[in-house]
Image (spheres, rainbow, N blue to C red):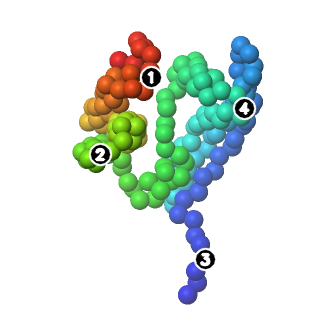
């Protein structure tokens, strides 16, 4: 039997890169990559039109601020799935659906730090799992589940902010 590997999908895109020095100190550098093309699977195809930001050197805060600035300036939205995720979904005709998590299920006698991390991860995962479904389908239930995930995430921060040594912020509501 012939065991040659055969691609189930291909990505064809052009990438343009640019290094950006972040003001005001210019101590951080961010690589902006612009990808334009398509993902193809047989006779099916979806477009690729992405901007990716990678911190080359410096502070994560600068990377985050740059990303927010670019998103605001060009009315962009965050898309969390990579090209391979979209290619596999194209291959399987999988349509993302809203997602409800199981109960958190913390063990007895768990360390407080571990419980906080698990709880934060649960809220964050709840948000992320529904983000793709909303972005690709506009499913109202997915956006509702995203709100629940964020609410759970913020509730953990609020409940444990003193233990986590967080200063109050009007941005975390």
What is the spatial separation of the Cα atoms under label 1 and label 2, in whole angstroms?
22 Å
Mark 4 or 2, which is nearer the eye? 2
| Residue receiving disc 4 | 57
| Residue receiving disc 1 | 165
Q: Which disc is residue 4 wearing?
A: 3
Q: Position of residue 14 (x, y in %)?
A: 69, 43
Quarter occupied by the C terminus? top left
What is the spatial separation of the Cα atoms under label 2 and label 3, in whole angstroms?
52 Å
SS under mark 2: loop
- In the rendered structure, which disc, 4 or 2, sits on the residue that comes first in sequence? 4
SS under mark 3: loop
Identify the residue at image location x=63%, y=33%: 53
Q: Position of residue 99 (x, y in %)?
A: 30, 44
What is the spatial separation of the Cα atoms under label 3 and label 1, in whole angstroms?
56 Å
- In the rendered structure, which disc, 2 or 3, sits on the residue that comes first in sequence? 3
Identify the residue at image location x=71%, y=13%: 24
Determine the residue located farthest toward the bottom in the rendered image: 1
Circles 3 and 1: CB distance less than 8 Å?
Answer: no
| Residue receiving disc 2 | 109
- Horizontal side of 44 relative to 113 (left or right) equals right
């Amino acid at each position: 039997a012939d065991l040659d590997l055969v691609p189930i999908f291909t990505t064809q895109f052009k990438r343009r890169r640019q290094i950006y020095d972040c003001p005001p100190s210019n101590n951080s550098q961010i690589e902006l990559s612009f990808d334009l093309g398509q993902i193809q699977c047989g006779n099916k195809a979806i477009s690729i039109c992405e901007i990716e930001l990678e911190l080359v050197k410096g502070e994560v805060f600068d990377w985050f601020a740059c990303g927010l600035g670019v998103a605001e300036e060009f009315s962009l939205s965050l898309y969390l799935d990579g090209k391979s995720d979209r290619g596999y979904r194209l291959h399987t005709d999988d349509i993302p659906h809203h997602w409800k998590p199981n109960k958190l299920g913390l063990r007895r006698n768990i360390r407080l730090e571990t419980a906080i991390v698990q709880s934060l991860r649960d809220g964050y995962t709840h948000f992320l799992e529904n983000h793709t479904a909303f972005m690709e389908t506009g499913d109202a239930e997915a956006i509702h589940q995203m709100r629940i995930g964020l609410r759970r995430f913020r509730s953990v921060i609020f409940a444990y902010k003193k233990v986590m040594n967080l200063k109050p912020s009007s941005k975390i509501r």
